[in-house]
Amino acid sequence: MSIIVQKFGGTSVADSNKILAAARKAIRAQEEGHQVVMVVSAMGKNTDKLIALAKEIDENPPAREMDMLLSTGEQVSVAMVAIAIQHLGYKAVSMTGAQIGIKTNNSFMKARIESISTDRIRKALNDGNIVIAAGFQGVDDNFNITTLGRGGSDTTAVALAAVLNAESCEIYTDVDGVYTADPRVVPKARRVKQISYDEMLEMASLGAGVMHSRSIEFAKNFDVPVHVRAAYSDESGTMIVADPESYERAVCGVAIAKDEVRFSICGVPNVPGMADRIFRPIANRQIAMDMIVQNFGMDGKAEISFTIPATELSSTLKALDEVKSNVPEAYDTFSYDNNLAKVSIVGLGMERQIGVAEKMFETLAAKNINIQMISTSEIKVSVLVAKDQGAEAARAVHEAFELGTTPSDVKPLVKPEMISDEEKIRLINRLEHMEDLLIESVNLDETQASVTLFDLPQEPGLASNIFRRVTEAGIIVDMIVQSSGDKFTNLTFTVERACASAALELANSVAAELGCSAPKTCPNVAKISLSGTGMRSHTMIAARILKAMADNKINIDMINTSEMRFNLVVNEEDGQRALEVLKNELKDVIAD
Ligand code: ADP
Ligand code: ASP
Ligand code: MG
């Protein structure tokens, strides 16, 4: 019999009436002939309330005890849903993460799933029960209760759907699907019928809170079709599948992260290994960094900037203190700014269209919004702006890319094919631990050059001015990184080698107009790209890459990351060696 997993978020089980409504949805699916597994979150804002309660005593409560505390939220809901189903005359059994057998590692508050045993669930289903599983929680090898990180019930649901080879995983929430932007921020956002795993993963990781990004890693790795829909209606919702809604659009959505913190670390000696020294303690704490930019100053020292979510501020401060006490020369000072929002455009079609980043910069310039940092990759462009301009920036960009209108070339909704049980088992066996990262390929690109502009003025319109001219000159840009640290506002971009001198000439004229230092070009750079699913959220990958480069004395000129890629630019002479080093160092996680 086919299995359906239905997940209900906090708002969808916020009171007894909603719990009864959720129960009826599950009963209906069972009546239609499916076996049903429900995954439920804590009722309403219970998780927030529990966090606030702990903070009444300690601002930084111990993580193990937080997991003990927070897991109670879901325990209440599973019992309530089971009571509701039984009250309606059907068989139901509730289970905690530990009772199901969701084994995780011991990273409290952001544990990763290692394995799930299905015996108990299957037995309960075969006995005619609707099984109600507590979302967001698991248990480690020492029977400690763990949680998967905020929003983690989505990941429980997709993981269960994966191991049970469910026909579909339905995510019932307080919106009727995935929109081109958060509809609370961008009222003109449009619901999409389908979105690809890659785009959803990137959107979620960049702030689209409708799905926990790790749930999409699961969905992609285990081929689980995910159906996001409203708990309050029968609207058709959004399918998250391998095939996107439309290939023709460069941009599929806008994501906004309202609470970003940018760190600038000054006076980092420009010798291989320093980035690793700084980033490892951060990665060890499983803090996912984004927008990593390294600028070189005239004094031979570098300034490293990166962003983290505001929730990671205190752990990042601790990590940097640890760096300073272990390696006093690693940096001189650091500062941070937590008054920022990150606005990103995401789209698989971006790689094939020129002028996408430029259009975003131009839109923000027209609104007089200053861009404080830029980082691009094949599938996204992210900018940092002042927090109070984040929503305006998102709305403007959404408008500029006409995301509110339905494209004419939308493909019909294709029901994804189920994969066989044997294939699923093969997939599951492939990963020793279910959430392990698999790097699909490591590539070397020796066709690019880089151009850097130094000491740029901090004002709206700067990036737009530069990239409008670059686009007009027919120069195709690949990577762009700009950071405004304490000392620098530098901007580096890569272009095809044939365009290097034209790009430098253009940079020279911009620099002369703005009265800043002479731009620099590296006519031959090598770009190494590592592709996988969840490259950014598996924080140790960045740390391992940086360490491998450091151990082999290879200097990294540029870094950019997305969930799908980790790109680094090195000197051409080091390119081949860097490729070999990475292939060797990461062989345990590279697919054969
Ligand atoms: P749940 O409790 O059901 O897990 P969440 O609050 O985690 O619900 O996620 C739903 C919310 O995600 C919506 O209310 C919406 O404000 C927000 N959201 C952010 N980005 C998007 C998007 N692109 N599409 C739809 N909703 C989004
Ligand atoms: N209750 C948890 C939270 O609020 C998990 C979830 O809702 O997905 O983060
Ligand atoms: Mg959620």
Image (cartoon, rainbow, N blue to C red):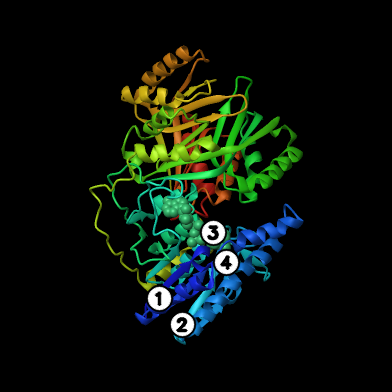
Spatial separation of the CA atoms under disc 1 and disc 2? 9 Å
- The disc labelled 3 sits on which kind of residue? Gly
| Mark 1, residue position | 3
Q: Residue 296: percent from the left, percent from the top?
A: 58, 25
| Mark 4, residue position | 42
Task: Name which of mark 2 and mark 4 comes first in the sequence.
Answer: 4
Q: Residues within 10 Å of mark 2 (few under 14, many from 20)?
A: many
Q: Which is more toward the observer, 291 or 51?
A: 51
Between circles 3 and 2, the one closer to the viewer is 3
Inspect this view and state whether residue 406 appears.
yes
Residue occupying the point 37% across, 77% down: 2
On residue 125, the disc is 2
**Quarter of the figure that contains the C terminus:** bottom left
Marks 2 and 4 close (CB-CB < 8 Å)? no
| Mark 3, residue position | 151
Dot 2 lies on which element?
A: helix
Residue occupying the point 46% across, 64% down: 430
Residue occupying the point 42% across, 50% down: 183
Q: Residue 525: percent from the left, percent from the top?
A: 45, 29
